[in-house]
Image (cartoon, rainbow, N blue to C red):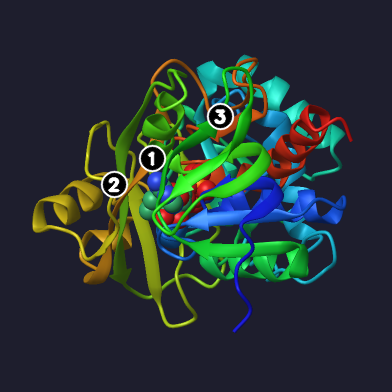
Amino acid sequence: MTAVPAAADVAVVGGGIIGLATAERLTARGASVIVVDEAGATGGATSASGGLVRAFEPESGHAAWAAEGCARYQARGWRGTWPSVRADGSLTLIDQNRLAEATAALETAHAAGHKADILTADEVNRRFPGLTVPGHLLGVLEPQAGWLPAADTARAILRDAGDRLSLRTARATGLLYSSSRVLGLHTSTGPVHADAVLLAAGVGSTALAASAGVHLPLSTRAIGYCLLRTEVPADLPTVVDRTTGAWLRRWDADGTVLAGVACARTGVPATVRAGVTAAEEHRVRTVVRHRCPRLAHARATGGVTAYDTLATDGPGTVTVWPRPRGLVTAVGWNGGGFKLAPAVGRHAAARILEVLNR
Ligand SMILES: Cc1cc2nc3c(=O)[nH]c(=O)nc-3n(C[C@H](O)[C@H](O)[C@H](O)COP(=O)(O)OP(=O)(O)OC[C@H]3O[C@@H](n4cnc5c(N)ncnc54)[C@H](O)[C@@H]3O)c2cc1C
């Protein structure tokens, strides 16, 4: 067995989609990287992700990264090796009063080369007979967007990184640093030495940053979905309803729909488990049935109860910390990090290479 090295140019804590997308871009530009993940890789939100990708992102402040991420997924990554986008089409529903603010995001999507059309409620209902959309809503339809299997995509990114990336299954317990710069990490299996450290460990990043005196205000937010068995209309697109928080997509070719509803509960355990409570199933059904009536009585066959990391002071960001020099964080994606990951990874890698003066 090859021993995992104890030193690299960059140590990345977190082998979720954000840490891996960054690590892959670093290796593509010649850097050596050690990814430290207590679960091996994809242990957190990425393992549960619905994998919806689209270019139109009106609310999170990440319109450009969503458009870039969607294009990269459509190209199947940097080398054409990632799973292909299941291009069922992506329909985002917005209140027509929000059209002005949606226009900027739509222009960003168009500028990046994506097809995205605005449909009236009547047009949506005619085009997708399985959906029911009231008159005060508009739909933004992206025919070439859809979803990907998230964990498989993360594993494909890991493979793309090749042998400049080493994976260490260990818990990072603190930063190794001098008064002014990062020297690496303490981990449960010994130190890792590196000239730069990326924290992409979700909510686990807070304690690691604090070990070097950096305040990273993060929490968790509940996110999950139910699997509902029904006769899925052949043309069911992925649906994100900004007015109710409902989102859904086809799960498989077998008539199952994955359906969730945004939840405001924060401070939940950072765990992922199969299944949902009866109360959660009821909560999801009572909302999604307004847009997809056949889900009202569809048989529940499972689901996921999980979390994502929320930045409590704003949207998720990549931050280069002035002190200790060499510390970069990429956290706080609040239920939407999968679609952004290729762009976040490219951007974070570029910032880390600047820190390394490369
Ligand atoms: C149910 C669900 C559905 C979602 N659907 C979508 C969607 O349709 N589209 C979309 O864009 N986004 C979606 N998201 C959000 C998206 O999946 C997340 O934003 C994204 O996966 C976050 O990736 P990450 O790499 O930041 O974190 P994570 O995937 O949580 O990875 C963090 C990693 O850090 C490791 N770690 C933590 N602490 C330590 C430590 N101290 N030492 C070592 N390792 C550590 C963990 O083991 C984990 O592997 C969904 C999320 C969930 C939960």
* Mark in the foreground, 2 or 3: 3
Contact, mark 3 vs mark 1 (Cβ under 8 Å): no
Q: Which residue is drawn at the image coordinates 23% and 33% (left, top)?
A: 267
Q: Which residue is mark 3?
A: 177
Q: Which residue is mark 2?
A: 270
The answer as to whether callout 3 falls within 8 Å of ligand 1 is: no
- Looking at marks 3 and 1 on the same chain, the residue that comes earlier in the sequence is marked by 3
Q: Is residue 158 left or right of residue 250?
A: right
Residue at disc 1, CB closer than 8 Å to ligand 1? yes
Displayed quadrant of residue 243: top left
84 left or right, relative to 90: right
**In the depicted structure, whether residue 27 falls above or below residue 309:** below
**Reading the chain from its start, which is encountered first: label 2 or label 3?**
3
Whether label 2 touches label 1, CB < 8 Å:
yes
Question: Quick one: 90 or 123, which is closer to the camera?
Answer: 90
Binning the other alpha carbons within 10 Å of mark 3 as few (below 14), some (14 to 19) or many (20 upward) gives many
Residue 242 is left or right of residue 228, and the answer is right
Q: CA distance from mark 3 to mark 1?
A: 18 Å
In the displayed structure, would residue 293 be above or below residue 175?
Answer: below
Q: Is mark 2 within 8 Å of ligand 1?
A: yes
**Dot 2 amino acid type:** Ala
Disc 1 crowd rating (10 Å Cα; few below 14, some 14-19, many 20+) is: many
- Amino acid type indicated by mark 1: Gly
The image shows residue 356 at horizontal and vertical percentages of 80, 33
- Residue 204's label in the rendered image is 1
Q: Residue at x 79, y 45 (%)?
A: 115
The 10 Å Cα crowd at callout 2, few under 14, some 14 to 19, many 20 or more, is: some
